[in-house]
Image (cartoon, rainbow, N blue to C red):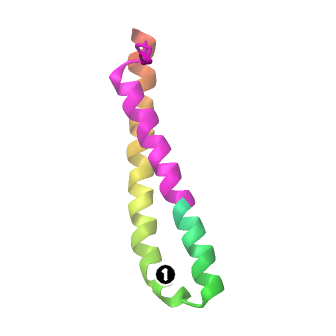
Amino acid sequence: MTKSKPSHYSRLFQLTVRFFKYLLLAIFGLTIAYILSMSFGVFSLFAALLPFLGDLFGKLTVILLCLITVTVILESLR
């Protein structure tokens, strides 16, 4: 049975890293879906979703940048 090492990072830092990881995974997955939709000829369906997804990921990126900023400030005060 292995014991997990206690993390010396704050919960805010862990949240920020996890948010960043899943945002990158989602962008990577959508990139693959975009390439596959072009190769199978169903680009019109993906093109209809593209403005919505662009806005969504734009807002999520702004939230991530705010989280990174707050994390850097709080970790430097620590």
- Does residue 43 appear left or right of residue 72 in this picture? right
- The residue that mark 1 highlights is 46
Q: In the rendered structure, which amino acid carries the disc numbered 1? A: Phe
The image shows residue 44 at horizontal and vertical percentages of: 51, 90
Q: Quadrant of residue 18?
A: top left
> Picture coordinates of residue 59 (x, y %)?
39, 55
Task: Name which residue lies at 39% across and 72% down.
Answer: 52
Predominant SS of the magenta segment? helix
As for residue 4 lying within the magenta part, the answer is yes
On-image quarter of the N terminus: top left
Task: Give the camera-side residue of 43 and 62.
Answer: 43
| Most distant residue in the left direction | 11
Farthest-out residue, front: 1
Whether the magenta-drawn stretch holds residue 51 is answered as no
User: Magenta span covers which residues?
Assistant: 1-28
Residue 70 in sight here: no
**Residue at point 48%, 57% (across, down):** 26
Task: Determine which quarter of the picture holds residue 14.
Answer: top left
Occupied quadrant, residue 55: bottom left
Classify mark 1: helix, strand or loop.
helix
Q: Is residue 69 above or below residue 45?
A: above
Quadrant (top left, top right, bottom left, bottom right) of the C terminus: top left
